[in-house]
Amino acid sequence: MPEPAIDRGQTALGKALQLLDVFVACGEPIPLAEAARRLNLPRQTVHRLTWQLVDEGLLRRDLAKDMFAVGPRLSGLALGTLSATWQPGPVHGILEELAGDIRETCNLSVLEGNRLLYIDRVECDWPVRAQFDIGAKMPIHATAGGKLLLAFLPSRSRTRLLAALPLPALTARTITDAARMAQEITGIRKLGYALNNEENAEGLVGIAVPIRDAAKRVAAALALHAPLTRVAHADLPAFAPQLRHAADRIEHQLNLMKDQSNDGTDDR
């Protein structure tokens, strides 16, 4: 027998979930007045719920202004869900096939705050390779995936993050100047892919392409990295079509999974 429909707005938990939905949808810090307006709830209610969610780590207060955004605990839950969904399902299978064809390590990553987080990867079968475990966090400014995701952030979020992002030198080739990083971002948006030229580790290069969600927003990066002994930096763009094809297949699978999830909800 179908379960009765529940009006989430009639419960404190429902209102809290609706509030989280607002902050997730915005993708950047917003003031409580804006959240209250979007939910058509009293400011006092939104204020109380927000601080409860902050206490639990689900939201965080922006240090620069009286604004709030998605917190680390909510990000962790979302990323854990992504990892659980993609492994060992069809998306992971596409990643395995790509790594097998290219014979180099391939990975999927997302932004977590000002770091790049690996959520899935398939190692190549060469004895010489760089290993970064699932869950490893890497610097945005020195990785192909990180630079790509930075480049495709909404303009305001990208400007804010770039202004606050530390740019330490990890190798002699790391981009440490904000103006030069801005130029790099312009090039990435024009080309549709990002390169890593020994910027995170000596002798390691890489390329990344975007994975978009159903709304055509860049949600993740698909990348490969390889040692210079096997792949020259100048040869990396030649891998872009294979990566793009795999990214298209991953996007298709994610849309199918979303449609199936929506169908299941409608059948209740």
Image (cartoon, rainbow, N blue to C red):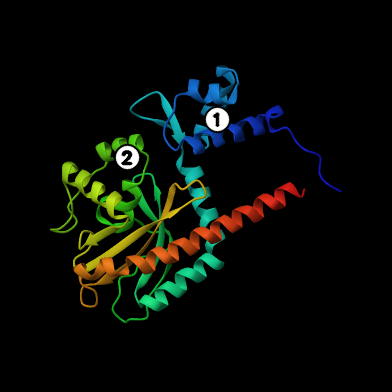
Is disc 1 surrounded by few (<14), some (14 to 19) or many (20+) residues within 10 Å?
some
Q: Percent from the top left, x then y, of residue 29?
A: 42, 31
Residue 165 in sight in this render: yes
- State the mark number for residue 136: none
* Residue positioned 60% across, 53% down in the render: 258
Q: Nearer the viewer, residue 220 or 173?
A: 220
User: How far apart are the two marked residues, 2 and 1, measured between alpha carbons?
Assistant: 28 Å
Q: In the depicted view, which residue is nearer to us: 109 or 244? A: 244
Decide: few, some or many residues near mark 2? Use Cα within 10 Å; few <14, some 14-19, many ≥20.
Answer: some
Proximity of marks 2 and 1: CB atoms separated by less than 8 Å: no
Secondary structure beneath dot 2 equals helix
Which residue bears the numbered disc 2? 158
N-term-proximal mark, 2 vs 1: 1
Q: Is residue 203 visible?
A: no
Mark 2 or 1: the one toward you:
2
Please tell me whether mark 1 sits on a helix, a strand or a loop.
helix
Image position, residue 205 (x, y; %): 24, 66
**Residue in the image at 45% along x and 24% along y:** 31
Residue 81 lies left or right of residue 128; in this view the side is right
Q: Which mark is residue 52?
A: 1
User: What residue is shown at x 32% (from left), y 55% (from top)?
Assistant: 192
Residue 251 place in picture, x, y as percent: 50, 58
Q: Is residue 171 shown left or right of residue 164?
A: left
Picture layout, residue 54 above or below residue 73: above
User: In the image, what residue occupies the spot 26% across and 42% down?
Assistant: 165
The image shows residue 124 at horizontal and vertical percentages of 37, 76
